Image (cartoon, coloured by chain):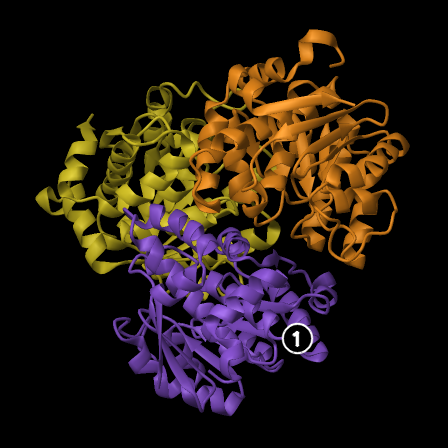
Chain colours: A purple, B yellow, C orange
């Protein structure tokens, strides 16, 4: 880890809980409830404030902002832009989740507009990151069995050229700032079967960057490690995607330093 | 079943899982998360894309479209119309869920506009189907203890005159194309106690019609049978509506041909 | 209780279940699904109808209206105003939930506009009630360990000057009409860890005021007591916020007069 021992996942996790950061989440309609519950369970304070009439004003007071374009509309996009601009101007970290940004012309333009406000972190799946780096993607997805391998080059390049932390999540996760890169192992095969887990993780990255704005790389790693560890623990009793999601909120709340260590493995590349 | 053995619920269910159809769901705010989780648990791929700026473009690429007017607004209605028009024009199946379409003038006009794009399937409760056939309904509902009996004539007539598959769901379900009709038995008394089960079922009908666009009648029967069978299985351990909903996602995911057979009974009228 | 024995929580609870009141809830995007499930589990009939094009028309037919500004936008605010005006004009009870009304200029104006339509009940946390009475609040909150103590004076004063029932909820709850005041004890420490519990409670207050429009004070007390009793019962098996929320819907559905008595204690001040 950069910053040596002060920004390990366990230390950042403990500090996040202690400080209960206020995170403004402009996320999609599917994720809204689950993401708020994930932040509460993790120990942060979510605030879903999206309208352009107040999103910029609010972003100046929140610890971090997260923006997810899953269920986009012109009105919501205006609110996202106002919030991103405000976060950028006051120097607050903000996280972009470019859901299916390649799927329609409306999304392609939206993501181009949002990128102008220089997100601190971009979190997406392999296909989204590859496409965001301007590379061709086939139809609706890359083989998700090894997204890290497929997206690593794109993620590194995107991080370098955009000066942003890039997190690619899937069976394993990758975080890179273009120079450094780590992989995170853990989680549960049920996670992709529960809608909005990725979107909720984006909000959690916001909570960790709010905790340690000066080390967004380490903060992102810590967020992903926490999520993976809670997922590993929730896997035990799950009988399907329904019970997994319930368990996950319980294990995320119960997570401590030992659980973090046991449930997520971090590999420096 | 029409098309003989090739479109039984078990075969369509297996094929749906294998093909993981992309279903565009424009549904209401209450149903959004649960419907997405139902599609994932069943084995389909949900995409909630609603804004008029992209809904038509997206509908041309999805396997099926579903439209639900539960929490209607002018902006969402524009997106629904654009998507329905697109699905109609490219010949993709689409499913209409006319939630409380008789409740206000705004809804009455909305449903008239949407019907012009000729849905493949209409799914509603008895009151909604009776009212959609232009018959008077008393206040907020028909006696829900026997909706099939009350709505059967209206459903057949509506199916004939609109050239559409009509699904009436309740304690038992009815599917008709005006000529053929089947009843589906199964499910759980907890289902009406969990919000958005009907809305989620509409999305599942979309997944099955995407799987077998040439046999929407059989696809609808298969969707309803799957839902009923998962509901029967989920009923066992439920202690109330909360645990039932969790169980239901688990049992829907675990559903196989034997479970389908055991948990849903189909009667040809 | 006022009205003597006829409006005890147990009697109002039984009558609410019997009459299944239709409650129009204009609530935030986070709360939508959970609030609908809470009303269904409690025995009421939720209807989420928010657009200005129909919200006023619908409010004239519903038993009560609830308005929550959690995820506000200009379009939704128009719908809230139209519904509040309609409820006021036809003399139907309506409940206002002024979520973070002090956080931005947009919210401050919105709440001022909504108050003009004279809500029957206002439900908020201590900070919201104190700020609504025009008193200064520090940053994002009052110490939540004793919100009743901090907010009691403000609640009484607000109730008097606005001629409204005020409910302050937290670890213990307070209900006052400016003259009378009661505290309600019960619930679970998991409740603030589950998003939208307060918002859902606002909707439940709507269900009880619809049941007994002539005694909104007693109706509010009964709603809060039901919620607290179900929370107490749900606490037993909970392993975290995820399983608590599931249990809560189960226990709310199972609640009877004995459970109400056992799980909530009412103290007249």
| Above/below status of A116 relative to A210 | below
The answer to whether residue B71 is above or below residue A200 is above
Give whichever of C261, C81 is nearer the camera: C261
View extreme (right): residue: C161
Where is residue C225? Give x, y as percent. 62, 25
* Residue named by callout 1: A92
Number of on-image labels: 1
Residue under the image location 68 percent in, 79 percent down? A91
Residue at screen point 78% across, 30% down: C88
**Does any portion of residue A99 appear in the rendered image?**
no
Q: Residues within 10 Å of mark 1 (few under 14, many from 20)?
A: many
Q: Is residue C180 left or right of residue B158?
A: right
Residue A222 place in picture, x, y as percent? 47, 71
The residue that appears at 64% across and 23% down in the rendered structure is C265
Q: Where B77 falls versus C40 (above or below)?
A: below
Q: Nearer the viewer, residue B266 or C237?
A: C237
The answer to whether any part of residue C171 appears in the image is yes
Residue B163 coordinates in the image, percent (x, y): 33, 41
Q: Quadrant of the C terminus of chain C?
A: top right
Could you say which is closer to the camera, residue B177 or residue C163? Answer: C163
Q: Quadrant of the N terminus of chain C?
A: top right
Q: Chain of mark 1?
A: A
Q: Residue furthest top?
A: C5
Front one among B53 and B120: B53
* Element assignment for label 1: loop
Q: Where is residue B127 drawn, in percent x and y?
A: 45, 27
Against B194, residue B29 (above or below) is: below
């Amino acid at each position: 880890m950069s910053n040596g021992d002060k920004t390990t996942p366990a230390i950042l996790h403990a500090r996040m809980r202690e400080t209960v950061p206020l995170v403004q989440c402009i996320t999609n309609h599917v994720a809204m409830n689950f993401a708020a519950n994930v932040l509460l369970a993790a120990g942060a304070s979510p605030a879903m404030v999206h309208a352009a009439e107040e999103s910029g004003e609010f972003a100046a007071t929140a610890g971090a902002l997260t923006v997810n374009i899953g269920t986009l509309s012109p009105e919501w996009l205006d609110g996202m832009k106002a919030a991103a601009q405000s976060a950028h101007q006051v120097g607050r970290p903000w996280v972009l989740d470019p859901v299916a940004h390649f799927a329609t012309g409306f999304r392609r333009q939206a993501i181009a507009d949002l990128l102008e406000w220089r997100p601190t972190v971009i979190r997406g799946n392999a296909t989204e990151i590859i496409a965001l780096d301007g590379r061709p993607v086939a139809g609706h997805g890359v083989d998700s069995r090894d997204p890290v391998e497929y997206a690593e080059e794109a993620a590194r390049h995107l991080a370098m050229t955009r000066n942003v932390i890039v997190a690619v999540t899937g069976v394993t996760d990758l975080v890179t700032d273009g120079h450094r890169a780590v992989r995170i192992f853990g989680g549960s095969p049920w996670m992709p079967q529960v809608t909005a887990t990725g979107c909720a993780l984006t909000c959690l990255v916001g909570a960790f960057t709010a905790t340690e704005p000066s080390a967004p790389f380490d903060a992102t790693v810590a967020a992903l490690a926490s999520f993976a560890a809670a997922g590993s623990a929730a896997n035990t009793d799950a009988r399907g995607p329904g019970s997994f999601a319930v368990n996950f909120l319980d294990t995320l709340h119960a997570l401590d330093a030992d659980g973090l260590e046991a449930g997520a493995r971090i590999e420096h590349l």
